[in-house]
Image (cartoon, grey):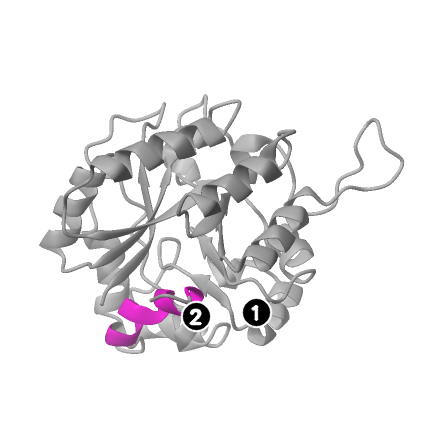
């Protein structure tokens, strides 16, 4: 088993993608011996109703005939009025988890003081609590492109360690994949939290591990079994993220291949 916890289908408005279908991802997976891919539909980052993208992915899965086993995650926008009904429907339809994209849906992972309410509202926590009720994990997209490569029309915000702490400390039970985020950047409170919250997993997309000191620094913050593989596909190449984990001797490459499976009851 080799699990990639960070793949997508769909369209990215700021770049021409190459492997943005299930068949395209399957081709990449077969070339690199990957057996399972956690997948969401990027279109849901930009649709007013994110669930329309989940329905597109559902239809694509029905027609898929490749070898890779896809683990679909429904993109949930908790600022949309019907989000909970849609999220329940998607789990009933076979989706295995939820994805939060606060950067592109315009809300915070921390409690917000809304203009028409007197009390703060913790939108993301509502999704976490529903995930706990339904027994599914959550993936949080903390960034999608490096600042240096972003289009001027793209968002220039990234999810911060303080926001992640505000959410993950309120629900310790739901397994969470935090993608494109270096735990070294999370701050002291976040570091202390994830040492206790063992069901928090990270991919190497934002890791700088081209020498032993950098790899050792990461393992001082997270345990080896919290490190998973994530390609941040469909950005055309898997080799850079594979190199980050395959050639750092401090990392247990074989364990990293399967660590992502721990978040799922059926794998």
**Is 261 colored magenta in this rendering?**
yes
For the point 51% across and 63% down, which residue is it?
175
Label 1 – label 2 distance at C-alpha:
9 Å
**Is 179 colored magenta in this rendering?**
no
Q: Can you give x and y, in whole percent of width and height, for residue 224 in the image?
A: 40, 76
Residue closer to the observer: 230 or 75: 75
**Which quarter of the figure has residue 53?**
top left
Q: Is residue 120 left or right of residue 125?
A: right
| Quarter of the picture holding the N terminus | bottom left
For the point 67% across and 50% down, which residue is it?
125
For the point 66% across and 66% down, which residue is it?
189
Q: How packed is label 2: few (under 14 Cα within 10 Å), some, or many (20 or more)?
A: many
**Which quarter of the figure has residue 52?**
top left
Q: Which secondary structure, mark 1?
A: helix
Residue closer to the observer: 114 or 14: 114
Question: Disc 1 designates what residue?
Answer: 194
Which residue in the rendered view is the most extreme toward the front?
92
| Quarter of the picture holding the C terminus | bottom left
**Which quarter of the figure has residue 245?**
bottom left
For the point 59% across and 59% down, which residue is it?
132
Q: Which residues are drawn in magenta?
A: 254-264
Which of marks 2 and 1 precedes in the sequence? 1
Q: Can you give x and y, in whole percent of width and height, for residue 157 in the image?
A: 55, 37
Q: Which mark is residue 37?
A: none
Q: How packed is label 1: few (under 14 Cα within 10 Å), some, or many (20 or more)?
A: many
Residue 141 appears in the figure? no
On screen, 121 above or below 174?
Answer: above
Question: Disc 2 designates what residue?
Answer: 226
Q: Is residue 134 left or right of residue 44?
A: right
């Amino acid at each position: 088993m080799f699990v990639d916890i960070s793949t997508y289908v769909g369209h990215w408005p700021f770049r021409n993608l190459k492997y943005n279908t299930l068949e395209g991802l399957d081709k990449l997976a077969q070339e690199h011996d990957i057996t399972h891919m956690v997948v969401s539909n990027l279109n849901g980052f930009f649709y007013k109703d994110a669930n329309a993208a989940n329905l597109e992915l559902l239809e694509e899965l029905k027609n898929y005939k490749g070898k890779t086993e896809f683990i679909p995650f429904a993109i949930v926008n908790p600022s949309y009025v019907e989000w909970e009904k849609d999220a329940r429907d998607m789990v009933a339809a076979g989706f295995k988890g939820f994805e939060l994209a606060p950067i592109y849906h315009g809300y915070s992972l921390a409690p917000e003081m809304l203009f028409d309410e007197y009390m703060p509202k913790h939108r993301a926590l509502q999704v976490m609590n529903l995930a706990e009720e339904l027994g599914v994990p959550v993936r949080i997209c903390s960034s999608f492109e490096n600042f240096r490569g972003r289009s001027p029309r793209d968002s220039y915000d990234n999810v911060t360690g303080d926001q992640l702490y505000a959410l993950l400390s309120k629900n310790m039970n739901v397994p969470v994949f935090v993608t494109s985020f270096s735990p070294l950047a999370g701050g002291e409170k976040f570091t202390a939290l994830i040492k206790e919250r063992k069901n928090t997993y990270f991919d190497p997309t934002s890791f700088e591990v081209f020498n032993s000191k950098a790899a050792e620094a990461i393992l001082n913050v997270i345990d080896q079994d919290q490190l998973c593989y994530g390609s941040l596909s469909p950005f055309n190449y898997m080799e850079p993220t594979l190199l980050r984990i395959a050639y750092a001797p401090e990392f247990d490459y074989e364990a990293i291949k399967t660590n992502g499976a721990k978040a799922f009851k059926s794998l």
